[in-house]
Image: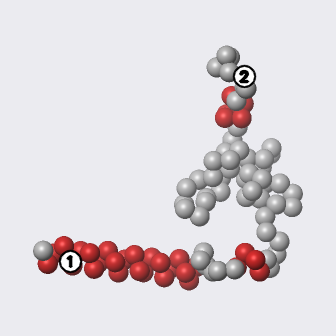
Amino acid sequence: MTDHLRITGPMLASPRCGAKTRSGHACRAPAVNGQMRCRMHGGANGSGAPGENRNARKHGMFTREAIAEQKRMQALLREALRVLDEME
């Protein structure tokens, strides 16, 4: 690794952010010094959306109700596919 122009070892060895992304995977960004989160998930001062940010609620796709509705629809589709497979 010494022949590489950039020394990336310390950055790769740094602790990772403990936040979960919208897709459910762990954030892979390095955590801010002395924090458990990266700069995008609340590790730095002033990071994150301001309180009562109406722009963050633009479409409501990630509200609890919308996520629950998506799960109900997925379950219904799985059940319909299972019934169709049984009919064949």
Residue type of the residue flagged with mark 1: Leu
Residue in the foreground of this view, choosing between 69 and 3: 3
Q: Residue at x 78, y 64 (%)?
A: 48
The quadrant of the picture occupied by the N terminus is top right
Question: For the residue carrying disc 2, how many other residues have a C-alpha within 10 Å: few (<14), some (14-19), or many (20+)?
Answer: few
Measuring from the top left, give residue 65's x and y in whole percent.
56, 83
The answer to which quarter of the image holds residue 54 is: bottom right
Residue type of the residue flagged with mark 2: Leu
Question: For the residue carrying disc 1, how many other residues have a C-alpha within 10 Å: few (<14), some (14-19), or many (20+)?
Answer: few
The residue beneath circle 1 is 84
Q: Residue furthest top?
A: 3
The residue beneath circle 2 is 5
Q: CA distance from mark 2 to mark 1?
A: 58 Å
Give the mark nearer the N terminus: 2 vs 1: 2
Q: Residue at x 47, y 78 (%)?
A: 70
Q: Residue furthest right?
A: 45
